[in-house]
Amino acid sequence: MSPGSSSPGGESSTAGLAEVEVIFAAPGWRGAVPSVEALARRAVEATLADQRETGHLTLLLTDDAEIRRLNGGFRGKEKATNVLSFPAPFGSLTLGDLAVSLGVLRREALAEGRTLPAHFAHLVVHGTLHLLGHDHLAAGEAMLMERAEARILHRLGFPNPWRTRWAA
């Protein structure tokens, strides 16, 4: 069923409806990940549909220097990371903000044998799940989050990024 369509019971379904504002804060993104804006929107929409949510978020496509600054300023970790999630306060009209670093994305994709689009989609799904309240601090939470990521990525046509971990 498509978002916004009526279910058999006559209820209107809006799960998966997303508004994604993409901000390019570093060069190279469009060349590295084909149709990066469309892929980001698809990944957010698939995540929201899976979680039966709707919402708006802002996605900052940046570089290692900026994400290191954000990670240091907000999390006290003075290093570049792949994705940062900044959930909005409860009751806000937005889900929050995500930031993804192109340099870390490239290095991780190469090290893990993934394509840039597949790894980018994974990071957007992962970050969006964080905005919706998911976490991976405890083993049980991590397993639930990883399974949701794998399920959503499968629906997007990408491989399970956790397959080797689950097979061990």
Image (cartoon, rainbow, N blue to C red):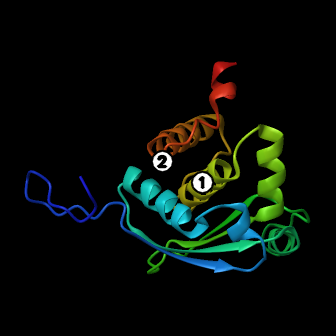
- Secondary structure of the residue carrying tag 1 is helix
Q: Which mark is residue 62?
A: none
Residue at label 1? Answer: 121
Residue at label 2? Answer: 156
The tally of labels here is: 2
| Residue at horizontal 74 percent and vertical 80 percent from the top | 25
Image spot of residue 138 (x, y percent):
66, 40
**Neighbours of disc 1 within 10 Å: few (<14), some (14-19), many (20+):** many
Image spot of residue 56 (x, y percent):
46, 75
Q: Quadrant of residue 84?
A: bottom right
Q: Is residue 58 left or right of residue 69?
A: left
Image spot of residue 92 (x, y percent):
47, 80
| Residue at horizontal 50 percent and vertical 71 percent from the top | 95
94 or 122: nearer the eye?
122
Amino acid type, label 2: Leu
Q: Quadrant of residue 78?
A: bottom right
